[in-house]
Image (tube, rainbow, N blue to C red):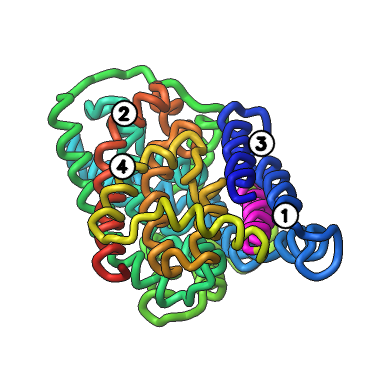
Amino acid sequence: MGVVILLVMAAGVAAMLSRKLPTAFALVLLAVAIAFLAGAPVSGEGSVLDTVLQQGAPALAATMIAILLGSWLGKLLEETGIAGTLVRKIVEFGGDRPVFVALGVLGVSALVGTVTGSAPAAMLAGLIGIPAMIAVGIPKVTAAGTILMGIAVGVPFELPVWQFFSTALDLPIPTVRGFMVKLFPFALVAAVAYVLIESRRRGVEHTWSLRTAPGGPTRGDRRRRLGDAPWYALLTPVVPLVLALGLEVAIIPSLLGGVLFALVTTTRPREMSRRLLRTLYGGFEVAAPPVVLFVAIGVLLAAVKLPGAVEALQPLVEAVSPQNAVLFVLVFTLLVPLCLFRGPLNVYGLGAGIAGVLVATGIYPAVAVLGMTASYNQVFGVSDPTSTQTVWSAQYAGVSPHQVMVRTLPYVWVVACGGLCITAYTHL
């Protein structure tokens, strides 16, 4: 039966890759199929209806709330002009020195990446940052990649990501935080190397035309009308980090602290309630796609943890999973491309189910699975041509997502290898 379950998983991957089914729908159908193949009854304890669907759907509720709060904070950064001010100040400081401008935009992207991910993060940093980099001679592909590499630097400190890995792998937040802090230097060094190497290797290109994404000029004009945010408001992206990382406050209160700080430092008292509601509703729109995806992931995790599924898959997974630390690093480093194009190791797709299988069967300790999935997440977030932030950044810069993938993949592949080395050294 284990072989049949694997074949069903392969069919699910094919459906996602061919765009026959949206990822969330495919994961739910896959979960139901796995549950039936594992011998789960229709209703009752350990069943399809009561365990997989009813208990699985809200399993990642804490992550969904964290995603919503991060999106809310991201909308505040946009509406109050904080993100735009950060980018403009960096561009003014860099002047006509291309590398300095790119490094500055990289830093702003990293700050934004700690608050929110995906396309909203790319837009917050890129609406002003990409045209500014291109204007001083940074090649278009390098400009798009700089935004993505910067967001990846911030991802190890993105609080909703901490919550996701904590809930999905049943790990305490301090354990997740500890690994993410170790992964951060690899992401930072790779991002800086990308800017320095790619900008110098490609040389200065003065190209004044820029393909504008829909809605881009309107948002930019709005920022210019709002003017610069106060200097102390620019500390907003750091506030949740100080609370969660420095003071060890829980994830949701830390994000709420960032929301309140952004509001108080930029908004007059009589306008606060309206701005809060307006940006909260906007945050719901931004958060809707990932929330739906996390509902589906919760359902899939519930299915692969059923006793019948664990019993069927354990011998097969155990036979192909390297136990030696060196082989672990080599094999999973070579498999990095499988997290691209919504592949089977994409943690926001079938990769979550595979991670659940590895934990449920006891093949690897949960913290080792954390290391593997978090390392792959660094690759997916930058180089996957199907991820929303990659598509938006590439199109806004006037290049194709595949061009960005080719330029950035070598750098994030090294980041993934570094994360896998840490995992093998400390947990195998």
Q: Circle 2 sits on which residue?
A: 406
Marks 1 and 2, how far apart at CA? 38 Å
Report the front residue among 89 and 24.
Answer: 24
The residue at 72%/50% (across/down) is 37
Task: Pick whichever of labels 2 and 3 is earlier in the sequence.
Answer: 3
Q: Which residues are magenta?
A: 287-305
Dot label at residue 334: 4
Mark 2 touches mark 3? (CB < 8 Å)? no
In reply to whether residue 38 is colored magenta, the answer given is no
Q: Circle 1 sits on which residue?
A: 35
Residue 126's x, y, as percent?
A: 41, 38
Q: Secondary structure at mark 4?
A: helix
Report the front residue among 344 and 193.
Answer: 344
Q: Is residue 366 left or right of residue 293?
A: left
User: Is residue 402 visible in the rendered structure shown here?
Assistant: yes
Residue 150's x, y, as percent?
A: 33, 47
User: Is residue 271 visible in the rendered structure shown here?
Assistant: no
Q: Amino acid at mark 2?
A: Val
Marks 4 and 1, how far apart at CA? 31 Å
Magenta: main secondary structure equals helix
Task: Pick whichever of labels 4 and 1 is earlier in the sequence.
Answer: 1
The residue at 16%/39% (across/down) is 196
